[in-house]
Image: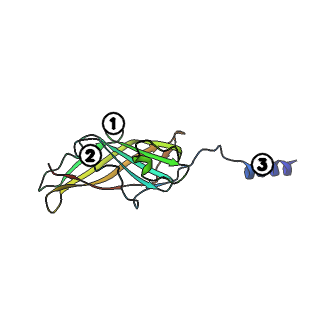
Amino acid sequence: MGKYFFLALCALALFSCSDGDLQIETIDFDSVSLQYCSAPVATTKNVLFKINGTEALILELQSGVLNKGVVGDTIVTQSTVSSQSQVTYRIFNDDVDNDYFCDDIPTADPVVLEEVEAEDGLVIIETYADTDGTNFVHNISLSGISFVTGNGERITNLTISEFGEVTTAIP
């Protein structure tokens, strides 16, 4: 009887299947280029994104956060995630490109399989004037970004510290 119970338990373990939920192991966008649909403007809200095959990391910067430059100085500003700026991670059913974000009429495909918004963290922006003094350069990094999935699982293995660099005109 014990042998049959052990065999049944082994069979159950081997043939059990998941409930279909996606498992997000890591979020790695450091080696992916920063993209945007229109050039960032210092005084407005800006949407920047990174695409890595079937995944996208979207950063919506609060209005005016890039408007902190001073010629001759390096200025560091911070924007709090979820209350001021938003970071969103999406998984699609197929590869995605910038047309998905930039077309006037959004495409129907690929389909978003999962979307997770960051609940905590900081967007850190280091701003300085370029060498010819016509633009501000903004180095954007993320710190302490915390994603929590719909199942309540916290994503902790993040590799997204360096988000990228954008420029805005010096007024």
How many numbered marks appear? 3
Mark sitting earlier along the chain (1/2) = 2
Looking at the image, which is closer to me, 158 or 39?
A: 39
Query: Which amino acid type corresponds to the residue marked 2 in the rendered image?
Result: Gln
Looking at the image, which is closer to me, 147 or 112?
A: 112
Q: Residue furthest left?
A: 72
Looking at the image, which is closer to me, 79 or 104?
A: 104
Mark sitting earlier along the chain (3/2) = 3
Badge 1 marks a residue whose secondary structure is: loop
Mark sitting earlier along the chain (3/1) = 3
Picture residue at 66% right of the left edge, 46% below the top? 18
Query: Which amino acid type corresponds to the residue marked 1 in the rendered image?
Result: Ser
How far from the left and from the top, in percent, is residue 72? 11, 56
Looking at the image, which is closer to me, 31 or 156?
A: 31
- Badge 2 crowding class, 10 Å Cα cut-off, few under 14, some 14 to 19, many 20 or more, is some
Give the spatial CA distance, label 1 vs label 2: 12 Å
How far from the left and from the top, in percent, is residue 104? 40, 42
Q: Nearer the viewer, mark 3 or mark 1?
A: 1
Badge 3 marks a residue whose secondary structure is: helix
Residue matched to label 1: 83
Residue matched to label 3: 9
Query: Which amino acid type corresponds to the residue marked 3 in the rendered image?
Result: Leu
Picture residue at 39% right of the left edge, 47% below the top? 102
How far from the left and from the top, in percent, is residue 117? 43, 41
Give the spatial CA distance, label 3 vs label 1: 49 Å
Residue matched to label 2: 78
Badge 2 marks a residue whose secondary structure is: strand
- Badge 3 crowding class, 10 Å Cα cut-off, few under 14, some 14 to 19, many 20 or more, is few
| In-image side of 7 versus 140 (left or right) | right
Q: Nearer the viewer, mark 3 or mark 2?
A: 2
Q: Residue furthest top?
A: 83
